[in-house]
Image (cartoon, rainbow, N blue to C red):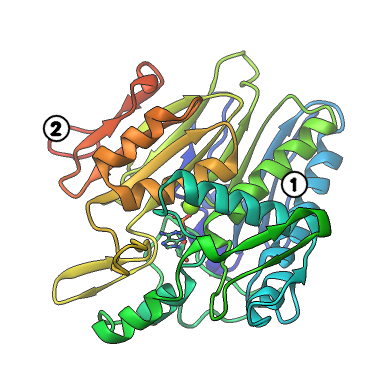
Amino acid sequence: MDKGKRAALAALIVAVACAGAWALSPRRAPEGPGVGSPSSGDRTEAISFTMGTVARIVAEGPGAEAAVAGALEELDRLSLLFDRFRPYGDVWALNAAGGEWVEVTPEVLELIEEAVRLAELSGGAFDPTIAPVIDLWGFVEVGAQPEEDGHEHSRAPGSAPTRMAGTEPPDPQELETVLKRVGYRRIEVDPDRGRARVGTGQTIDLGAIAKGYGVDRAAQLLKERGIVRGLVDLGGDIYALGTRADGSPWRLGIRHPRQDGALLGILRVSDAAVATSGDYERYFEHEGVRYSHIVDPRTGWPARELVSVTVVAPSGVWADALATAVFVLGKEEGLALLESLPGVEGIVVDAGLQVAMTSGLEGKLELLLTPAGESK
Ligand code: AMP
Ligand code: MG
């Protein structure tokens, strides 16, 4: 197993090891690249590298193996569709079109529409046109090389942070100039003609919600094939389908943002999506300050109030986008936004490792932190 996968398996959210549940553990990963399916009876568990991360799918029931294979194939297809760096791909074409209309695949159109909706919902805290600012800060991995299996392996969350191209904050004037290119309101979608366009000079990047979309599609495909029990995990973006075999909810561990391998708490969920955004995935330090990869579109500077945000939502797209948005909004505004949305809950951790959560999580979250923020 290559290093990228091994690192990724210590994932941001891990399913907690307990009877009848599943755990992300490097020891249980298959040897070699590609898909592994340690399966027994009607239970299939497969791991693959897709959508820039380690995907792990568990399904139980008749036909589980074929259903999981189909879901992984779909993730590979979506991964190509949403990649803004793939020459002549839909997103690349949109960004290269200089503000002209471009016909795009229905899935791309759908995700752009969702992205705009979530940008509106979050008051612009989540903004799919933030890419030029991210690039200027250098929140881009260095040294990502294609490995033996021909894929480029970016690091999935959970291990030592990826080395970023950036080393210090950008020049303020340059930042101001680049920030002018950001603004989701200039994205236009024309569903009747299957086309979209972005403002001149804008760059759309669906990276902050594409994994959420993938989780939804994979879960939907499993359901369509009659699977009623399973988990889809894309490097920490999770959909928990149904319950565990004994009828109890799935138990998902939330990573401690400052203690490697430790958990902050355990969430009980069924038929819901969960996503975490943290400041420990992609960051650099300059003069003792940590600058991490989630940027406030209002200022162009990395958000610094929170260190970890986990969102539970009816869909992966919502969980993914809202985790990023709440990270930007901070505790008060962020939790207020989550409270206002039906079926959505969340947990935020501030820089002092103090935890706060929405009211609906009572009884569903088992906190494993001491008052000092240490993992118990
Ligand atoms: P996530 O890990 O889902 O929170 O997504 C983080 C990624 O989304 C970053 O690596 C950036 O590429 C991008 N991003 C950063 N800030 C924002 C933002 N405010 N809105 C949308 N995408 C963002
Ligand atoms: Mg996100």
Label tally: 2
Q: Please tell me which residue lies in front, 342 or 259.
A: 342
Q: Please tell me which residue lies in front, 373 or 28.
A: 373
Who's the residue at 71% across and 77% down the image?
Answer: 93
Q: Where is residue 255 shown, x and y percent of the image?
A: 37, 44
What is the quadrant of the C terminus in the image?
top left
Q: Where is residue 206 shown, x and y percent of the image?
A: 58, 61
Residue identified by numbered label 1: 37
Figure check: 339 above or below 120: above
Q: Secondary structure at mark 1?
A: loop
Figure check: 365 above or below 47: above
Q: Which mark is residue 371?
A: 2
**Is residue 140 shown to the viewer in this render?**
no
Who's the residue at 60% across and 53% down the image?
Answer: 211
Q: Please tell me which residue lies in front, 202 or 61.
A: 202
Who's the residue at 34% across and 24% down the image?
Answer: 366
**Is residue 268 shown to the viewer in this render?**
yes
Q: Where is residue 10 shown, x and y percent of the image?
A: 46, 52
Q: Is residue 55 left or right of residue 357?
A: right
Figure check: 102 above or below 159: below
Q: Three-letter amino acid code at disc 2?
A: Pro
Q: Three-letter amino acid code at disc 1?
A: Ser
